[in-house]
Amino acid sequence: MNNDTAHLEEFQTELDSPEVVEEKSREVEEKLWVKLEKVGKKISFAKDIKALYKYMIDPYVPWYRKSIVVGALIYFISPIDAIPDLAPLVGYLDDLGVIAAVLKFMGSELIPYYEK
């Protein structure tokens, strides 16, 4: 298990109920756009973050599926992670790893959220 997967699993264990997922979703909504505004031009996966956000706010997605996405987005917006975001070029590699793992796990389920 790589370091990114371990961090994602750590966030995931906190998201064990619909109420917690809803609370953490609100936290993501408050902080996600601020972070994307700061780093959107520096990272190549901003479109993936936006698709994950759209998935997270879809009322038809069950809470337990949203919890996976919420965990990844919390990791992305969290100032504490495996590689500090301040490090030039490599600072977002751990974030990219977590997002890529979630994209791979979710697969084609996310395709419609790129088009919305």
Image (tube, grey):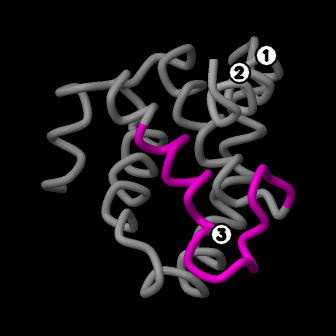
Q: Disc 1 vs disc 2: Cβ atoms closer than 8 Å?
A: yes
**Would you name the residue on which mark 2 appears?**
9
Mark 1 or 3, nearer chain start: 1
Residue 91: x, y in percent?
65, 69
Q: Residue at x 70, y 47 (%)?
A: 74
Q: Residues within 10 Å of mark 2 (few under 14, many from 20)?
A: some
Per the model, the C-alpha gap separating discs 3 and 2 is 20 Å
Would you say residue 89 sits in the magenta stretch? yes
Neighbourhood count class around disc 3 (C-alpha, 10 Å): few under 14, some 14–19, many 20 upward: some
Q: Are marks 3 and 2 in contact (CB under 8 Å)?
A: no
Which quadrant does the N terminus fall into?
Answer: top right
Residue at horizontal 38 percent and vertical 40 percent from the top: 55
Could you say where residue 43 lies in the image, as x and y percent from the top left? 44, 74
Tell me the residue at 55%/58% (across/down): 93
Side of 18 where 107 appears, left or right: left
Is 81 positioned to the left or the right of 4 in the image?
right
Disc 2, SS:
helix
Label 2 amino acid? Answer: Glu
C-alpha gap between disc 1 and disc 3:
25 Å
SS at mark 1 in the image:
helix
Q: Which residue is mark 3?
A: 91
Q: Nearer the viewer, mark 1 or mark 2?
A: 2
Residue 114 to residue 72: above or below: below
| In the displayed structure image, the side of residue 1 where residue 61 appears, left or right | left
Residue 38 position within the rendered picture, expressed as x and y whole percent measured from the top left: 61, 87
In the picture, residue 33 is in which quadrant? bottom right
Q: How many marks are shown on the rendered structure?
A: 3
Q: Which residues are magenta?
A: 80-100
Amino acid of disc 1: Thr
Q: Label 1 belongs to which residue? A: 13
